[in-house]
Image: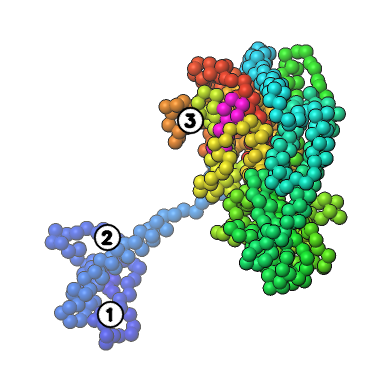
């Protein structure tokens, strides 16, 4: 056996071992441990151990070296042995390997193709089954369509019945007015109105208190005339009657304004007797529910008295020095009604008549849509610019006028826009500009929310108003219509700033609560029951406008739906509202304009309201279906829920999963209640503006 050789270089002074070079011509031997626990004689273990020199610590330090060298040698020998046995691959063998690889690839492709074809056949089979099921459901829906529409038509007879009751109420109101004999005219009779206006014009030397008392009658007549225009169905209004009512309103507004001017002049004639003991100038405040008068006359002409504040109020103003030494008087007339905004004409749609049941239903829907939308439109137009006016007029001013600073604030005299701390604008009216509200001439506008004090400067005297953004509460964030009791529901509309809750029962509506930024807000309207149209007007005047007009879509980004689909949905939701709750769904934004999606569930008194079991319905006006998806699903799909069918109406759709008691309550709902709910849904347009 060859012996190990020492590597040239000699012994290292800092090491106790020599470097050992091993030759590759070792004979093979197996690693067999002898009985004595040592490798065989002549092995690498023994010979390598002989080359180790050093002190007594050397055997322990070099203990692992023989084993490592042995393992390394064994590995080298194995590689040499396998290398010597490895044969060169021939061309035929390479071709065979390639052929096998190609066959394996083709086999995998064939298996993938067969798998795809199988899956595709299964998918097509599923589609075929689904299509056949869909066709069967459509055929079944078409077969019973006329029957369902006839049943719906019978249920919707409550709407003309409600209109008939309204007409009887109007006639009864005229009769009550006739038998009262209180001296006030019937606003619907032109002769009586002309007589009333003429007699009041002839009356002179009325005090301001007398004019205020008379103004209550006048404002009541104006309100009645407006309600006649809004509540009377357009088909029952003739053009001559519309013109007559509008002319009467304008004449009453102008005459009332003239009477206030004359009464103010009469009051100023007594200025010396009404002089303040401290300042020597006249100060007079007259308060009423509709009008508040502030009059100041400069009797002393003291240039140091430029700032005026009426006692026990937050109302005041500051005039320039040149006016402080002049014979002037300033009147602040704060009116709680709008006597400035012009009226808009009212048009009447033509009547339509049809014969078949289906056409009758469609015609009835279209007529109601026109009537109600026209009512809402007109009341919106007439009330759009209504807010509390603070009028400032110059009575005796000949000198040049500079800036006038006016400070106004009080709980009962602020507009609701200020109370709600919403965005608002101060505008003034210039007669020469054609009676348009404008913002120029007003500067230094500031508002202190804690004190509820607004301060601004004017370049000239004239009417001033606070106008709220009409669409500040649009679009809505969500909504819900929930039954409370028999023929009583709660409509909740949540906007960016407010949460408005409205109760509806029979033919009346009431503001239940208002929350501003999750804080309870007290409104004077809470607890007051009114019919729908006066209620809508009152909410707008209070700054709680959730009633779009025909032009609102120019100012609000909406989810516009086809009007006829909306109207049909609102009418059928109103029919079911006594028993079923409806709510906003995010999927309504994703379906197209010809369909609406909303949540619905049967309202049970003992049901837990924390996690209600909602169903998603999609309605196109002609077909209702229950969706497979839920509100929490990740993607929108129009897939039909398992074991459900198509129906032509919402009534028949919910009947599939509702109790018999619920459907019996629906059939026994009060017609005025259903009509009022429908009116509020049409007025708010929840499906398009949320």
Q: Quadrant of residue 122?
A: top right
- In the picture of the structure, the residue carrying the numbered disc 2 is 29
Q: Is residue 366 visible?
A: no
**Which residue was labeled with disc 1?**
18
Q: Position of residue 358 (x, y in %)?
A: 72, 16
Which residue has dot 3 on it? 613
First in sequence: mark 3 vs mark 2: 2
Crowd around label 1: few <14 · some 14–19 · many ≥20 (10 Å): some
Left/right of residue 493 with respect to residue 15 in the rendered view: right
Query: Looking at this view, is 248 or 113 the one in front?
Result: 248
The x, y position of residue 326, in whole percent, is 78, 68
Q: Pick whichever, 437 or 681, lies toward us.
A: 437
Tell whether 579 sits left or right of 252: left
Is 37 situated left or right of 27 in this image?
A: left
In the rendered image, is residue 168 in sight? yes
Which span of residues is magenta-colored? 503-512
Q: What is the chief secondary structure element of the magenta stretch?
A: strand
Q: Earlier in the sequence, mark 1 or mark 3?
A: 1
Q: Give the SS element for disc 2.
A: loop
The label number, if any, that marks residue 286 in the structure image: none
- Give how far across and how far down residue 398 sits, in percent: 83, 65
Which corner quadrant of the image does residue 478 belong to? Answer: top right
* SS type, badge 1: loop
Where does residue 46 sit, x and y in percent of width and height? 21, 69
Residue 506 is one of the magenta-drawn residues: yes
The nearer-to-camera label among 3 and 2 is 3
| Outermost residue toward the front in this view | 273
For the residues marked 1 and 3, what is the alpha-carbon distance in whole angstroms?
Answer: 88 Å
């Amino acid at each position: 056996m060859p012996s190990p050789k020492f590597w040239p270089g000699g012994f290292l002074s800092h090491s106790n071992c020599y470097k050992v070079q091993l030759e590759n011509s070792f004979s093979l031997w197996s690693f067999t441990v002898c009985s004595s626990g040592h490798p065989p004689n002549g092995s690498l273990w023994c010979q390598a151990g002989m080359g180790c020199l050093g002190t007594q610590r050397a055997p322990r330090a070099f203990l692992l070296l023989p084993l490592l060298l042995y393992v390394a040698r064994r590995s080298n020998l194995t590689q040499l042995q396998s290398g010597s046995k490895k044969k060169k691959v021939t061309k035929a063998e390479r071709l065979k390997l390639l052929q096998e690889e190609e066959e394996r690839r083709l086999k995998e492709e064939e298996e993938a193709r067969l798998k795809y074809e199988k899956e595709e056949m299964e998918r097509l089979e599923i589609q075929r089954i689904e299509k056949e099921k869909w066709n069967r459901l459509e055929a079944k829906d078409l077969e019973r369509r006329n029957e369902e529409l006839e049943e719906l038509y019978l249920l919707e007879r409550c709407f003309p019945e409600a209109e008939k009751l309204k007409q009887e109420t109007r006639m009864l109101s005229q009769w009550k007015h006739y038998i009262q004999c209180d001296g006030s005219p019937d606003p619907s009779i032109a002769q009586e109105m002309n007589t009333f206006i003429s007699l009041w014009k002839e009356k002179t030397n009325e005090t301001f208190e007398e004019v205020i008392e008379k103004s209550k009658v006048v404002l009541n007549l104006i309100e009645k005339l407006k309600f006649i225009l809004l509540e009377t169905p357009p088909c029952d209004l003739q053009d001559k009657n519309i013109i007559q009512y509008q002319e009467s309103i304008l004449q009453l507004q102008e005459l009332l304004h003239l009477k206030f001017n004359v009464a103010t002049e009469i009051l100023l004639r007594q200025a010396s007797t009404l002089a303040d003991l401290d300042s020597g100038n006249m100060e007079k405040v007259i308060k009423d529910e509709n009008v508040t008068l502030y009059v100041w006359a400069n009797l002393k002409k003291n240039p140091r008295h430029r700032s005026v504040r009426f006692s026990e109020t937050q109302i005041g103003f500051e005039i320039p020095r040149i006016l402080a030494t002049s014979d002037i008087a300033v009147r602040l007339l704060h009116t709680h009604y709008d006597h400035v905004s012009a009226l808009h004409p009212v048009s009447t749609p033509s009547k339509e008549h049809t014969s078949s049941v289906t056409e009758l239903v469609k015609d009835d829907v279209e007529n109601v849509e026109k009537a109600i939308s026209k009512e809402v439109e007109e009341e919106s137009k007439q009330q759009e610019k209504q807010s509390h006016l603070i009028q400032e007029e110059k009575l005796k001013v000949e000198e040049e006028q500079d800036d006038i600073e006016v400070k106004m604030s009080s709980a009962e005299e602020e507009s609701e826009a200020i109370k709600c701390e919403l965005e608002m604008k101060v505008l003034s009216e210039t007669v020469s500009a054609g009676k348009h509200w404008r913002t120029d001439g007003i500067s230094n506008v500031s508002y202190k929310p804690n004190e509820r004090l607004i301060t601004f400067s004017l370049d000239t005297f004239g009417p001033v108003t606070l106008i709220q953004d009409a669409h500040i509460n649009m679009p809505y964030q969500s909504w819900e219509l929930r039954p409370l009791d028999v023929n009583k529901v709660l409509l909740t509309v949540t906007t960016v700033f407010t949460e408005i809750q409205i109760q509806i029962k029979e033919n009346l509506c009431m503001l239940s609560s208002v929350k501003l930024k999750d804080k309870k807000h007290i409104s004077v309207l809470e607890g007051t029951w009114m019919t729908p149209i006066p209620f809508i007007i009152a909410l707008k005047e209070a700054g709680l406008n959730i009633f779009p007009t025909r032009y609102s879509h120019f100012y609000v980004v909406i989810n516009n739906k086809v009007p006829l689909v909306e109207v049909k949905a609102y009418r059928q939701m109103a029919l079911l509202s006594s028993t079923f709750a409806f709510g906003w769904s995010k999927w309504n934004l994703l379906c197209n304009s010809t369909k609406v999606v909303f949540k619905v569930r049967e309202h049970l008194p003992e049901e837990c309201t924390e996690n209600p079991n909602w169903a998603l319905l999609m309605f196109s006006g002609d077909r209702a279906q229950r969706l497979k998806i839920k509100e929490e699903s990740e993607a929108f799909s129009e897939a039909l829920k398992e074991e459900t069918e198509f129906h032509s109406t919402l009534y028949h759709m919910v009947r599939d999963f509702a109790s018999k008691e619920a459907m019996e309550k629906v059939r026994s709902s009060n017609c005025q209640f259903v009509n009022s709910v429908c009116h509020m849904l049409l007025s708010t347009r929840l499906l398009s503006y949320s």
